[in-house]
Each structure stands twice: as structure tokens, then as C-alpha cells.
Amino acid sequence: MTAPSLAKSRGFDAATVRRLLPVYGVYVALAVLVLFNIAWTDNFLAWNNLRIQLVQVTPVVIVALGMALVIGTEGIDLSVGSVMALGAALIPLYLGYGMIPAIALAVVGGVFVGLVNGGLVAFVGLQPIVATLAMLVAGRGIALVVSNGKYKDIRDKDFLAIGTDAFLGVPYTVWIAAVLAVVVGFVVRRTVFGRRLLAVGDNRAAAQLAGVPVKRVLITVYVIAAVLAAIAGVIQVSRIGSADASRIGLLIELSAITAVVVGGTPLTGGKVRVLGTVAGAFLMQLLTATMIANNLKDSTAQMVQAVIILVAVYTARERRTR
């Protein structure tokens, strides 16, 4: 048997690689990066360093989970960073009445933005990028109005404990992200709503003919994405101890989209890879941290990330057209 035929018989032909790369590529890349750091980065396995990496990536993971659902419907949500800012701006308004009312108000703000986004997409018929781009601008504007454009310190100890305390040595914020990832994964794989979401993303017209309540699914997806963004805003405020509507959530939509795409969820919809999204967020976070730890400029990390995004999108596109 010749070498090419032997390789093909063992499943190593080019077609197999193209098929597996979008699914497993992010895990391979993450494993290689971890091994590189173990070998070359000082104190990489020290718990303090790992804890920092986990805490820093948590908001991106939470926002990316919602983004993955939106992209699964062949949509996009550019307003998530503004939702984080709005949630951050709303927290100080009710924090004097207790932590729960303050968090609830931030979540309600997310629900409002999600309803607007979903309504514009489902009922008005706007393209998701247009609808959410409008809310990207309007949402942060509302946040700045609510906060009077002022930076506000947070001193409530119970609220700050969310971002600073730990359970079994693991920060609360990491536990929150892990629970949300499990819940989103369960929703996508095990519920009727998850199947409807994927059907809408795969073929909206066919889903409509099959009796799927497309408009309701779209609105729900955008509400979930906005609520998750609001939760990420709450976590960010509790971690840094201040509410700054002008900076919180800035450009996080790009990080979230990157995590989703690198994690194997195609921009064409019809699939949602929750675990891949989490791995994608960790990959991009660790890539930046690795370059900084090895004295490379942040601009270099951004260029490498851009190349990774292009490869991920091209691979997914090639797979879709076959």
C-alpha cells in the first residue's frame, strides 16, 4: 500500500483535516499554547497567575456565550459592550437598597436592550448588524446619561465580594461563568428552544414553514445575550470596585465574536459550539498573556489574533461550501 493510500485509510487525508479543524482546532491550539507556557513562561502554573487569567477572561466568556446563541441564528450583536456599560451605570442607583435590587435593575436594563434588538430584527426586519450597531451607540449614550458621565466608586462590601471572594479557592466570578456555560450548553443541546434556535439559523424560511415561532426565538435569543452582557457588567463592576460607563465593556463585542468564531461556531448560523466558545475565549486571553510575558508588544498579539480569526473564518467558510 502506498503512503498516500495508507494515510487516507487511516483518516489523515486533507478532506478529513478540513472537516475536523473547525471543530477541534481550538483545543489543539490551546493545548499547544499551554505546553509552550509550561516550558517557557516563568511561574505559569502558579495558582496566582492562573487565577488572574481566569478572572480576566470571565467577562469575555459570559458575553461570548450570548454571542454564540445570536450567531447561531445567523445574527450578530454589537451592542453587548454598551449593555455592560448600562448595567454598570444602573448598579449604583439602587445599591443603597441592597445588592439584589441593584443587580436586578442591571438585568432589567439588559432585558430592555435585548427586547429592542430582537424587536428590530424580528418585527422591523432590520439586519442584525444594523439594529445592534444602533444600540451600541444608544446604549452607551444612555449609560452615560444615567451616570451623568461620572466615575462612581462602589463601597458595598457584599457586592464587592462577588468580584473578590472565592469558594474552594476558585473566585466566585469563575463559578458564575462555569454555571452559565453549563446552562447555555444544556439549553442548546437538550431543549426544544435550542433545537428551534439552530433551525432558525440553518434555514429561517424552512423553520417558519415547519411551525417554529421564529420571531419569538429571535427576540428570546437577543434578550438572553443582553442579560448575559448585563451580568458581565455586574461582575466587572464588582471586580474593579467602580462603575465607569465610558470604559466598561469597551470593544468587548470584538473579543466575544472572536471567541465564538475561533471556537468553531460558523457565522452562517445553524450551529452553536458552547465548549468551543469557552476554549476560544481562553485561547485569545492566553495568547495575549503569553506575548506580554515574553516581552512582545500588545500590537503583535493583536496581529496574531487577526491571523487566527482569518484562518478560523476561512476554514468555516470552506467547510460550509463543501
Image (tube, rainbow, N blue to C red):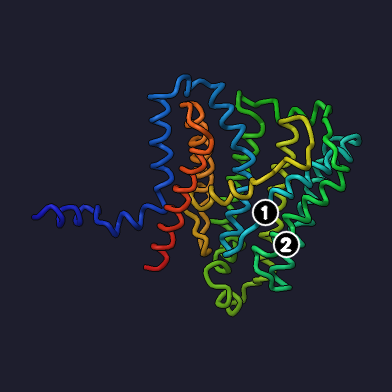
10 Å neighbourhood of mark 1: few (<14), some, or many (≥20)? many
Q: Would residue 322 appear left or right of 207 to someone viewing this image?
A: left
**Label number found at residue 225:** 1
Residue that mark 2 sits on: 117
Whichever of labels 2 and 1 marks the residue nearer the N terminus, that label is: 2
Name the one closer to the observer, 118 or 161.
Answer: 118
Horizontal and vertical percent for residue 182? 58, 45
- For mark 1, give the secondary structure: helix
Taking the view exactly as shown, the residue that stands out farthest to the right is 97
Horizontal and vertical percent for residue 42? 45, 20
Q: Would residue 76 appear left or right of 139 to someone viewing this image?
A: left
The structure residue drawn at horizontal position 9% and vertical position 55%, both measured from the top left corner, is 2
Q: Quadrant of residue 159?
A: top right
Assess whether mark 1 and mark 2 are in contact (beta carbons under 8 angstroms): yes
The structure residue drawn at horizontal position 56% and vertical position 56%, both measured from the top left corner, is 188
Amino acid under disc 2 = Asn
CA distance separating discs 2 and 1:
10 Å
Q: Using the image, determine if residue 7 lies above or below residue 290.
A: below
Taking the view exactly as shown, the residue that stands out farthest to the left is 1
Q: Quadrant of residue 8?
A: bottom left
Horizontal and vertical percent for residue 93? 89, 40
Name the one closer to the observer, 68 or 179.
Answer: 68
Amino acid under disc 1 = Ala
Horizontal and vertical percent for residue 129? 64, 63
